[in-house]
């Protein structure tokens, strides 16, 4: 999927009007590089969900966030998995049902996500 095939309006559409539905229930923490700058999702992992809201445990990144950016909570927002699957439909389906500890990346030039086994989930 190229950047021009992203549904860049997905963040502005009412939840009931979103088309992709093959996603689990829950919220995801999303980098503003995705939600505001509309860069494609290229890296995602699933950690133990927070108990303070209906958290899915998924964390989505563009791959262009450095450590300083990632360490600033103001650079992230919370959206539904449905919203993100409408933004970039290739993430819907089986991948989002993966267990806690799952990590996926999409390398530049690749047309699909691949499971990552050598990246440790951060401790909170």
Image (cartoon, rainbow, N blue to C red):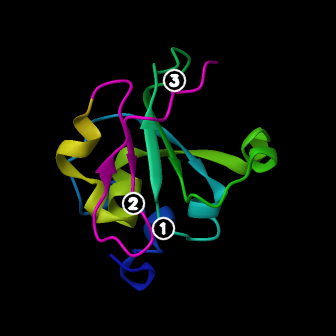
Q: What residue would you read off at disc 1? A: 40
CB-based contact (under 8 Å), mark 3 and mark 2: no
Instruction: Give, as a single range, the part of the protein colored magenta.
Output: 99-124
Quarter the C terminus occupies:
top right
The quarter of the picture where residue 112 lies is bottom left
13 and 36: which is toward the camera = 36
Q: Residue at x 46, y 25 (%)?
A: 47
Instruction: Answer with left or right where residue 116 lies relative to residue 49.
Output: left
- Which label was assigned to residue 53? 3
Work out which residue is located at the far front of the displayed protein and give it.
118
Q: How dense is the environment of label 1, judged by Cα within 10 Å: few (below 14), some, or many (20 and up)?
A: many
Query: Residue 5's x, y, as percent?
Result: 36, 81
Between disc 3 and disc 1, whose residue precedes?
1
Q: Secondary structure at mark 2?
A: loop
Query: Residue 26's x, y, as percent?
Result: 38, 34
Q: What residue would you read off at disc 2? A: 106
CB-based contact (under 8 Å), mark 1 and mark 2: yes
Distance between the Cα atoms at labels 3 and 2? 28 Å
The quarter of the picture where residue 100 lies is top left
Eye-nearest disc, 1 or 2 = 2
Eye-nearest disc, 3 or 2 = 2
CB-based contact (under 8 Å), mark 3 and mark 1: no
Instruction: Answer with left or right where residue 73 lies relative to residue 106.
Output: right
Q: Secondary structure at mark 1?
A: loop
Distance between the Cα atoms at labels 3 and 1? 25 Å
Q: How dense is the environment of label 3, judged by Cα within 10 Å: few (below 14), some, or many (20 and up)?
A: few
Q: Residue at x 58, y 61 (%)?
A: 35
Query: Residue 113's x, y, as percent?
Result: 31, 56
Between disc 1 and disc 2, whose residue precedes?
1
Instruction: Answer with left or right where residue 20 lies relative to residue 122.
Output: left
């Amino acid at each position: 999927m190229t950047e021009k095939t992203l549904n860049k309006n997905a963040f502005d559409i009412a939840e009931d009007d979103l088309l992709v539905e093959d996603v689990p229930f829950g919220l995801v923490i999303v980098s503003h590089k995705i939600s505001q700058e509309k860069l494609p999702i290229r890296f995602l992992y699933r950690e133990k969900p927070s108990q303070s809201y209906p958290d899915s445990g998924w964390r989505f990144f563009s791959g262009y966030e450095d450590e300083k950016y990632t360490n600033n909570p103001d650079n992230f927002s919370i959206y539904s998995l449905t919203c993100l699957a409408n933004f970039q439909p290739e993430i819907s389906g089986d991948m989002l049902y993966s267990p806690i500890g799952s990590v996926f990346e999409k390398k530049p030039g690749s047309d699909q996500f691949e499971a990552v086994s050598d990246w440790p989930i951060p401790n909170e």
